[in-house]
Amino acid sequence: MACDEVLHVVRHAQAGERRGFQGSDELRPLSAAGRRQSEAIAEVLAAETGPLLSSPALRCLETLAPLSRRRRRAIVPLGMLAEGSDPLGAYGVLTGCAAGQGVVACTHGDVFEGLVELAVTRGARLASAPDARKGATASFVLREGRLIEVRFVPPPASL
């Protein structure tokens, strides 16, 4: 019986508006609502034991920070998860890190949506309606190295 590998890809939690932020967009932090979302994301993904990977952008690192503290595991920043990156390259990095572990990665909307599109073109079944809102998670299920399904977890409420 084959053991499934799961890659959890989180679209970063809510951040302040890009046009209202002074300075480099890489340094734009989460909003108060986004910080609450990141705490809830940590609860949902707390049982995963694999590596924590993230875009180097501050808002992505902050999205995984509560999970990093909870699991006492460092976040590894990867340029392949940065905004504007090629989803195919990100897919290669993520699947290479899976190795039977529950990988958790945080990225941006364009890479997130590109990974979902790539999964579908490779024959993966969408187990639920796609959800690419900030703070949403797409769980990519692989069996024997082949993408078979994508499950979506909606973003946590940011009360």
Image: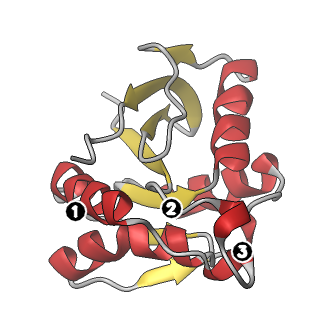
Q: Nearer the viewer, residue 129 or 144?
A: 129
Image position of 39 with respect to 110: above or below: below
Instruction: Give the structural element (helix, strand or loop) at label 2.
Output: loop
Image position of 15 with respect to 154: above or below: below
Which quadrant is the N terminus positioned in? top left
Depth check, mark 1 against mark 2: the one in front is 2
For the residues marked 1 and 2, what is the alpha-carbon distance in whole angstroms?
A: 14 Å
- Left or right relative to 126: residue 151: left
Q: Position of residue 128 (x, y in %)?
A: 42, 14
Residue type at mark 2: give it. Answer: Ala
Q: Position of residue 66 (x, y in %)?
A: 25, 73
Which residue is the site of mark 2?
15
Does the image show residue 81?
no
Depth check, mark 1 against mark 3: the one in front is 3
For the residues marked 1 and 3, what is the alpha-carbon distance in whole angstroms?
A: 23 Å
Image position of 83 with respect to 128: above or below: below
Q: Residue at x 42, y 74 (%)?
A: 62
Q: Position of residue 156 (x, y in %)?
A: 27, 42
Q: Callout 3: 10 Å neighbours few (<14), some, many (20+)?
A: some
Q: Residue at x 72, y 23 (%)?
A: 122
Residue type at mark 1: give it. Answer: Glu
Which residue is the site of mark 3?
25
The answer to which quarter of the image holds residue 81 is bottom right
- Left or right relative to 26: residue 7: left
Which residue is the site of mark 1?
39
What is the residue that sits farthest to the front in this orientation?
A: 20
Does the image show residue 47?
yes
The answer to which quarter of the image holds residue 125 is top right
Residue type at mark 3: give it. Answer: Asp
